[in-house]
Structures are given as structure tokens and as C-alpha cells.
Amino acid sequence: MKTPRVTANRIDEYLSSGKRFDGRKLNEFREISIETGISKKAEGSARVRIGKTEVLVGIKMDVAAPYPDSPNKGNLMVTSELLPLSSSRFESGPPKFPAIELGRLIDRAIRESKFVDFEKLCIKEGEKVWSIFVDIYSINADGNLVDAAGIGALAALKTAKFPKYDEETGKVIYDEHTDVSVPLSKEIPIVTTIYKIGKSLIVDPTQEEEDACEARVVIGGTAEGTIFSMQKGDAKEISIEEMNKVLELSKESKKNVFSKIEKFLK
């Protein structure tokens, strides 16, 4: 559901003068807060709020057979569920495109960055490996769910601990967690989304701003500028000049976001 054209025009006019309805600058995020360890049953978990947007992320682990093309590597699956309680625009039932896309965007950033050391998830090559499931749930949708989900996935993975595994029986004992953390690299993939409204480029939109968006670019990369993944969405074109500005704004945003969440990722 898109914003009525009059409202979108008003947002465009404000942004053209460097203003936003909530008083932020075009390159400014809302307040970010993170809580970890919110679930006793999950191997890792986090609650992330960006302004009024809120997501929960849980990590579950299981032992399974590896994929045929990677017999010595563990598996990763990222899924998202956009709950009706978070927005009237979401419905119960099988996941629709926005939920599927959200999961894939976060999956790609984690996978392409090699943030998870998949080879260290191998138990017995060609037979048994650890599978990591990252489950994302929207609790309140007020714009920019993608960036919130990306932060939540990082925080949940950083705090995740392996469940106990009985090698003799081949069973995972989920009620008992070990002190062993998920093997992660130092390359931290922060997901930031740049939105185009009229001639303006902004970060972290409210829902009204996101509804007025004509194009967006989701970029997964480090605060230092390394890019691992990128996806352009929505119908409006982005010029080469605008794309250069998108890349600069994304890098700047990653530095700002990382400075706010760094203490949760140690």
C-alpha cells in the first residue's frame, strides 16, 4: 500500500529542502537499541529497535547432511515472518514476496561476507554438519525493516552458543547449551538501505517515507567500505551520478551504525 500522492509530494518537498517531518537530517538514523539473550530456548537471540520499528531474531542450530557441492561446509538458512501484529498490511499465511525478499537480503549479506566460517561447522565431511537457522520476526513495522533485521541477525549470531551434541547417538540436546560460540570472522556485514524519493536520497525512512520511495538500494558491507552484496529495488531508475552518491551515503551510514552497535558485536 503506497502513500497517497499528495502526502508523497509533501514528503518530497520537505526532503528537497533538506528537512524530514521528524526533524532528522536526510543521512540520520533514528535511535537504535539492541537487547540480546531474550530467548532461553534459542541458541542466540536479539531484539532490535530502530525508532518505532522493532524486530526479533532467533538462532536455532541442528545437525544435518551437507549440500552435495559443499561436503565440508555447514548450512545457513535465513527466513523472515512479517507478522500481522506489526502492521495491518501484513497477513497470516504462507510468506509473501516482501518476507521472502527480506530473508534473502540478509542471507546474501551474511553468506557473501563469509561472516560465518562454514568449514568449522563440519562434523564429518560429506555426512554431518551444523545447520544454522536465522529466523526474523517483525514486531512493529514503521519503516526500514531490512536494516533492523540485518542488525538483529548480527547480534543474535554474535551471542549464539552451540547446543550439546551427543556424537554416539547423533542427537542434539537442545536444553543444554555449551560455551562454544558460532565461528565468525572479523568482517562484519552491516546492511544499510538507501531510499530515493524524488531527487533526494535518505536512510532509515519512517513507514510514510518508505511508502513514498521510488527506488532503493540495499547494500551489505563493512564500515570500512568493503561491499559484499547489493540489490536495487522498486521501479524508478537511478542515474550513475545518483549511484555514486548512494555508495558514499551507504559507507557513511555503515560507519554511523557500526559506532552505535559496536559494543554489542564484541
Image (spheres, rainbow, N blue to C red):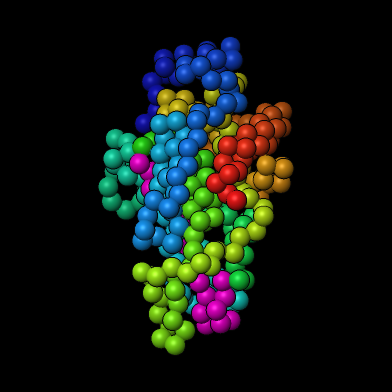
Horizontal side of residue 107 vs 225, given as left or right: left
Residue located 67% across and 53% down the image: 187
Above or below, 154 against 123 in this view is above
Q: In this view, does 110 lie above or below 18?
A: below
Residue 140 visible, this angle? yes
Q: Residue 156 colored magenta?
A: no
- The picture places residue 245, in percent across and down from the top left corner, at 69, 29
Q: Looking at the picture, tell me which residue is in the foreground, 254 or 211.
A: 254
- What residue is rendered at 54% in x and 50% in y? 154
Q: In this view, does 84 lie to the left or right of 222?
A: left
* Residue 195, image x, y percentages: 55, 30
Residue 98 sits in which quadrant?
Answer: top left
Residue 84 image position (x, y, % from top left)? 29, 41
Question: Which residue is more in the foreground, 176 or 25?
Answer: 176
Q: Residue at x 63, y 50 (%)?
A: 188
Q: Quadrant of residue 28?
A: top right
Residue 69 lies, with reference to residue 154, above or below; the image says: below
Which one is in front, 7 or 134? 134
- Magenta stretch: includes residue 127: yes
The residues colored magenta run: 121-139
Chief SS of the magenta region: strand
Residue 78 appears in the figure: no
Q: Which of 73 and 56 is in front in this view?
A: 56
- Residue positioned most to the front: 179
Left or right of residue 255, residue 89 in this image:
left
Of the 4 image quadrants, the one containing the N terminus is top left
Residue at (58% x, 11% y) in the render = 17
Q: Position of residue 14 (x, y in %)?
A: 52, 13
